[in-house]
């Protein structure tokens, strides 16, 4: 049974769209096809339909992390699901991992990392602006992963407290200025990741990574296009999620002279 504080995704067949809700007894949700009371949702369950006052159904679905991170409250640009999934794979995020992140922002990636490290793992997230850390913590609480995150309000020019982390991710404009700190925080053989919006920033980052003798350096750009779901008119949507940033990954190794 659903209970107060649970998050649900309500999907409308008529609108072919949905809404994320955190359930509060007595509250109501308005839409273009009518109003639904939260109490009606609480009296139902996942997979079932609830009706608006005008007779239109909404299906109660389990919320997806990707949908949540796109729609969470934000004051900053977020890392989109198309990049977040790649980050999880290329940083090898696993249950029990320790991940150091800088550039907390609104907590989109923070919540994603915390979701996948599980209760045995931990995410340490740095941001020099306290208002961003506070918002990110609130967003992580809504997804019920805040207990896996340590938020630190600090400029990483002062360095990281952590050592032997399984992954480091930098979402800052000038990550090349902090690689010496990242090397100390990151376990040997593990990977650092970063995201940058422009090619001239990527050039700076690549030069610094090579100078610091990182291995297996990769630069990736991801495009994301949905398709229309009419089987008689199957074709791509007119709009797509194009460039949002360049992902860079590299492995931390001991520097050795080539003989």
Image (spheres, grey):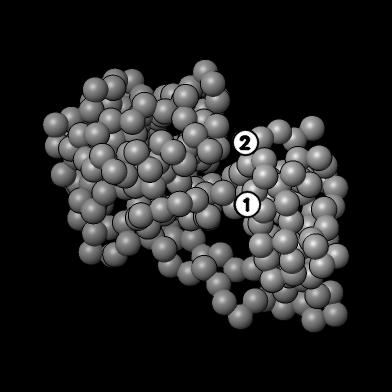
Q: Residue at x 23, y 43 (%)?
A: 129
Residue closer to the observer: 35 or 204? 35
Left/right of residue 125 with respect to residue 177 in the rendered view: right
Q: Which residue is mark 2?
A: 5
Q: Position of residue 49 (x, y in %)?
A: 84, 52
Q: Residue at x 52, y 55 (%)?
A: 70
Q: Is residue 241 above or below residue 234?
A: above
Q: Secondary structure at mark 2?
A: loop
Residue closer to the observer: 220 or 117? 117
Q: Position of residue 128 (x, y in %)?
A: 21, 40
Report the mark closest to the observer, 2 or 1: 2
Q: Quadrant of residue 180?
A: top left
Left/right of residue 141 with respect to residue 160 in the rendered view: right
* Mark 1 surroundings within 10 Å by alpha-carbon count, few (fewer than 14), some (14 through 19), many (20 or more): some
Nearest to N terminus: mark 2 or mark 1:
2
> How many marks can you see?
2
Left/right of residue 85 with respect to residue 214 in the rendered view: right
Residue 210 seen in the current view: no
Q: Position of residue 196 (x, y in %)?
A: 31, 56
Residue 244 seen in the current view: yes
Q: Which residue is mark 1?
A: 20
Left/right of residue 38 with respect to residue 147 in the rendered view: right
Q: Position of residue 109 (x, y in %)?
A: 44, 44
Q: Residue at x 45, y 52 (%)?
A: 73
Q: Quadrant of the N terminus?
A: top right
Could you give the CA–CA distance between mark 2 and mark 1, rounded to whole angstroms? Answer: 12 Å
* Mark 2 surroundings within 10 Å by alpha-carbon count, few (fewer than 14), some (14 through 19), many (20 or more): few
Q: Quadrant of residue 160?
A: top left
Q: Is residue 122 above or below residue 241?
A: above
Residue at the far front: name it.
Answer: 26
Residue closer to the observer: 178 or 228? 228
Q: Quadrant of the C terminus?
A: top left
């Amino acid at each position: 049974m659903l209970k107060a504080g649970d998050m649900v995704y309500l999907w409308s067949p008529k609108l072919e769209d949905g809404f994320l809700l955190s359930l509060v007894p007595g509250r109501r949700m308005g839409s273009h096809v009518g109003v639904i009371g939260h109490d009606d949702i609480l009296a139902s369950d996942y997979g079932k339909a609830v009706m608006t006052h005008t007779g239109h159904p909404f299906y109660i679905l389990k919320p997806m992390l990707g949908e949540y991170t796109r729609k969470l409250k934000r004051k900053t640009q977020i890392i989109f699901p198309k990049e977040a999934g790649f980050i999880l794979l290329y940083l090898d995020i696993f249950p029990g991992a320790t991940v150091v992140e800088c550039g907390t922002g609104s907590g989109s990636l923070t919540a994603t990392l915390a979701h996948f490290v599980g209760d045995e793992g931990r995410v340490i997230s740095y941001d020099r602006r306290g208002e961003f850390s506070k918002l990110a913590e609130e967003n992580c609480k809504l997804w019920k992963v805040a207990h896996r995150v340590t938020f630190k309000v600090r400029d990483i020019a002062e360095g990281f407290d952590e050592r032997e982390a399984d992954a480091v991710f930098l979402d800052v404009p000038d990550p090349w200025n902090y690689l010496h700190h990242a090397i100390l925080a990151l376990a040997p053989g593990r990977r650092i990741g970063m995201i940058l919006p422009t090619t001239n920033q990527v050039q700076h980052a690549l030069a610094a990574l090579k100078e610091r003798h990182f291995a297996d350096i990769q630069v990736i750009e991801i495009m994301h296009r949905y398709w229309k779901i009419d089987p008689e008119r199957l074709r791509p949507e007119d709009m797509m999620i194009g460039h949002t940033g360049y992902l860079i990954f590299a492995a931390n190794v001991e520097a050795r002279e080539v003989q």
